[in-house]
Every structure is written in structure tokens, then in C-alpha cells.
């Protein structure tokens, strides 16, 4: 239900989709850290 | 008092510094591109996919391996744009991970099933539960490749792909080769939270946007407390905060 609401609101332009450069860089670092912690440095 | 003279043009030193910085930036970008291999399209057929065969884009690091591998699952918009080019977010992540030594496989759950996208429209034609079969088939396929270390395979996904991650990592689902760790970016958790028998079978982290008004982060944080997995929430971040080409 929430998902459908989200889709509907996105169609109406009410939901936001967009880049946050600081969050993007932090997420990239976090993903690399998680994989390295699990698998070691490739 | 004599006024200080302000040069109308940048000094020669400043121009040299700017030129050097530009050159360094270009070299860095070129190096990043050079380390990332060009993707190839592979076809995956498996008994576990109820929706049938599908294709995937494969990014390989240079060298023979065996390398750790990451399967990355696209969102509701699909893997490709209207020009049939890989979308910027998926390409950026795949190139980054391949450049540091991971095989990256991006299953395309839509094209082979005659679907372009499922973000809009009354019905979602392909569910995360169905796409979980693709994720399992992708692990099977990777485990058979000589350049992949099947003991080091991870799973990640964005939005609808992150929901697929949650369906894939539930305890007891995968019977074949296993993912050892999983990551989902900006996923809603209301639906999966209603499943009392849903428990993650691998270490799981969800990366969430604090201001996500499409898939709010609260239910995922609540589910994380119930099930003991990690969430990381980024402030001032909407849905799709990692897209390199979004406004």
C-alpha cells in the first residue's frame, strides 16, 4: 500500500528522487568497506 | 593612501596551477576508466527461475582471478535507459567495484520478460519474490565461472532491487551457492516486516535516505531492530541519493 502510494506520488511529482553527493560518496565508501571486511581486499 | 592594484587577469602562476589541476583530474578519470573492463552480455538459464532465462551485464577486473563477485540488482526502472544503454547509477557502481577487483554481474530481470519498467502503472508485473529467483540463478552462474571465487560472493540492490535482496537473503531460500553478505539501498520494509517468518540468513546492511518520501526509512529501522541487521541513514538524502546523473 505504501509502495503504491509512493509510486502514485512519484507520478504526480510529489515524491523526491535526487542525488545527495555527500550521501553518495559515503554510501560508496560504506559498500566498499562492507565487501572488504567480508572478503578481504580483492 | 595609494589603492592596491588588482590584476584584471589571473597571474601566470595561477593559470599554471589551474592547468595542472585540470590535467591531474583528466588523468585520474582516465585511470578509473582504464581499470574498469568493458561489460559483456551473458545469458543465464536456470531451473530456479520461474520467469525463464534472462541476460545480465558482466563487468570483470583485469586478470585471471579468481575474484570475489558482486551481483547488483536494478530498481523498478530497469537496467537500461530508453537508448538501451546501461543506466548511470548501475554503470558507475559496476565500474567502481570492478576497478578495485570485484567481478560485477547485473541481471536484467525485465527485458527478457517483455517489461521495460515497473515504476508506473497500476500493477507491478514482476515481484521482488520472482526476482529473487534471478538472484539465485546469478549466484549459480557465477559459481561456475573459473574467474570467480564462489566462496566470496555478495549481493546488493537498489530500491525494487533492494527489496529483491531482502527476499533473496531470507533464511532457507537459496539452496545452491550462497551470498555471504548483502546490501540494499533505499528500500521500503513495510511489506517484508509483515512476514513473521522472514529472517535474514546473511549479514545485511540497508543504506537509507533520511528524507526519502517514497520509501520511508522508519519501517526498515524498526525491522532492523527486530532482526538485528544494520542500517545506515544519510541526512538530507532522498530516494536515489547515489544516482550520479539525477538532479
Image (cartoon, coloured by chain):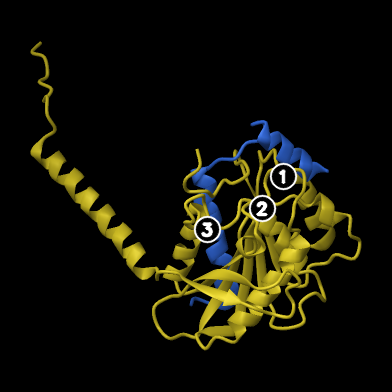
Can residue B77 be seen at all in this image of the molecule? Answer: yes
Q: Tell me the quarter of the picture where residue B200 sits.
A: bottom right
Task: Specify few, some or many for label 2: CA neighbours under 10 Å numbering under 14, 14-19, or 20 or more.
Answer: many
Considering the numbered disc 3 on the image, is that residue within a helix, a strand or a loop?
A: helix
Q: Residues at marks 2 and 1, common chain?
A: yes
Q: Nearer the viewer, residue B94 or A33?
A: B94
- Chain B: its colour in the image is yellow
Q: For the N terminus of chain B, which image quadrant?
A: top left
Nearer to me, A37 or B141: B141
Quadrant position of residue B96: bottom left
Which residue lies under the disc numbered 1? B215
Residue in the picture at 46% in, 58% down: B92
Q: Residues within 10 Å of mark 1 (few under 14, many from 20)?
A: many
Q: What is the residue that sits farthest to the front in this orientation?
A: B114
The mark nearer the N terminus, 1 or 3, is 3
Contact check, label 3 and label 2, Cβ < 8 Å? no
Q: Circle 3 is placed at which residue position?
A: B90
Q: Identify the residue at the far right of this view.
A: B196
Q: Secondary structure at mark 1?
A: loop
Residue B241: horizontal and vertical position, in percent?
57, 46
Q: Chain of mark 1?
A: B
Mark 1 to mark 3 CA distance (whole Å): 20 Å
* Chain letter of the residue beneath label 3 in the structure image: B
Q: In this figure, which residue is indicated by the disc labeled 2? A: B159
Q: Does B143 sit left or right of B30 as displayed? A: right
- At horizontal 17% and vertical 46% (from top left) the residue drawn is B19
**Place of residue A38 in the rendered image (x, y in percent of width and height, measured from the top left):** 61, 74
Tell me whether circle 2 and circle 1 mark residues in contact (CB < 8 Å): yes
Considering only vertical position in the picture, is B127 above or below B57?
above
Residue A20 vertical position relative to residue A37 in the rendered view, above or below: above
| Number of numbered discs overlaid on the protein picture | 3
Amino acid at each position: 500500500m505504501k509502495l503504491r502510494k509512493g509510486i502514485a506520488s512519484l507520478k504526480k511529482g510529489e515524491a523526491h528522487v535526487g542525488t545527495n553527493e555527500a550521501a553518495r560518496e559515503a554510501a560508496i565508501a560504506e559498500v566498499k568497506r562492507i565487501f572488504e571486511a567480508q572478503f578481504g581486499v580483492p | 593612501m595609494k589603492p592596491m592594484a588588482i590584476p584584471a587577469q589571473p597571474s601566470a602562476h595561477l593559470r599554471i596551477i589551474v592547468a595542472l589541476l585540470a590535467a591531474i583530474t583528466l588523468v585520474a578519470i582516465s585511470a578509473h576508466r582504464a581499470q574498469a573492463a568493458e561489460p559483456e552480455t551473458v545469458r543465464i538459464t536456470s531451473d530456479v527461475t520461474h520467469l525463464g532465462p534472462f541476460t545480465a551485464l558482466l563487468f570483470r577486473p583485469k586478470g585471471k582471478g579468481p575474484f570475489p563477485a558482486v551481483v547488483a540488482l536494478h530498481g523498478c526502472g530497469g537496467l537500461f535507459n530508453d537508448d538501451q544503454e546501461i543506466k548511470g547509477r548501475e554503470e558507475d557502481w559496476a565500474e567502481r567495484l570492478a576497478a578495485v577487483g570485484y567481478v560485477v554481474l547485473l541481471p536484467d530481470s525485465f527485458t527478457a520478460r517483455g517489461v521495460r519498467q515497473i515504476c508506473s502503472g497500476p500493477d507491478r508485473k514482476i515481484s521482488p519474490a520472482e526476482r529473487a529467483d534471478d538472484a539465485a540463478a546469478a549466484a549459480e552462474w557465477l559459481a561456475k565461472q573459473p574467474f570467480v571465487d564462489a566462496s566470496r560472493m555478495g549481493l546488493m540492490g537498489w530500491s525494487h532491487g533492494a527489496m529483491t535482496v531482502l527476499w533473496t537473503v531470507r533464511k532457507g531460500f537459496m539452496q545452491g551457492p550462497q551470498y555471504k553478505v548483502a546490501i540494499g539501498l533505499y528500500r521500503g520494509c513495510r511489506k517484508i516486516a509483515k512476514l513473521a517468518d522472514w529472517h535474514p540468513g546473511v549479514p545485511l546492511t540497508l543504506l537509507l535516505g533520511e528524507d526519502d518520501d517514497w520509501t520511508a526509512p522508519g519501517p526498515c529501522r524498526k525491522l532492523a531492530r527486530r532482526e538485528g541487521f544494520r542500517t545506515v541513514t544519510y541526512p538530507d538524502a532522498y530516494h536515489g541519493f547515489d544516482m550520479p546523473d539525477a538532479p
